[in-house]
Image (spheres, rainbow, N blue to C red):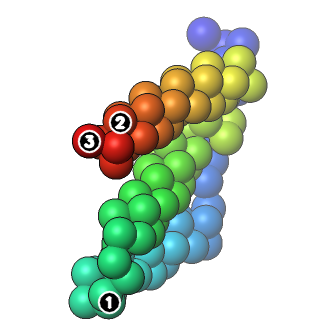
Amino acid sequence: MSEEKQHISSYRSHIFVLAALLVLTAASVAVTSLEMGRFNTLVAMLIAGTKAAIVLIWFMHLKFDNKLYAIFTTLVIVIFLLVLYVTFFDYSYR
């Protein structure tokens, strides 16, 4: 157990992450009042994906862990996005 690396996050970084998440939450609420046609869902998904990436990097410690975990996480996200793309592609041609 003594071989494990420990990291200490500063209050400044947590405040920055909190501010970023609050700004993105306000942006997602503001997007609902805009009329962008079929792009409303796309913009909402991009904002949600950005918030999820911030949570993964900071609170699930992907920034500090082995890079292999980040590669696998990225691979899962890419596969998920491909499945979403195929789903929306199929839906748009029905």
Q: Are marks 1 and 3 in contact (CB under 8 Å)?
A: no
Q: CA distance from mark 2 to mark 1?
A: 26 Å
Q: Give SS at disc 1.
A: loop
If the image is split into quadrants, where does the N terminus sit? Answer: top right
Q: Are marks 2 and 1 in contact (CB under 8 Å)?
A: no
Residue 90's tag is: 2
Residue type (three-letter) at the residue carrying disc 1: Leu
In this rendering, the label closer to the viewer, 2 or 1 = 2
Residue type (three-letter) at the residue carrying disc 3: Arg
Q: Residue at x 67, y 41 (%)?
A: 63
Above or below, 4 relative to 56 = above
Q: Which residue is mark 1?
A: 34
Q: Residue at x 57, y 73 (%)?
A: 16
If the image is split into quadrants, where does the C terminus sit? Answer: top left
Res 72 → quadrant: top right
Residue 51's tag is: none
Res 83 → quadrant: top left
Q: Residue at x 56, y 38 (%)?
A: 61
Q: CA distance from mark 3 to mark 2?
A: 7 Å
Q: Are marks 3 and 2 in contact (CB under 8 Å)?
A: yes
Residue type (three-letter) at the residue carrying disc 2: Asp
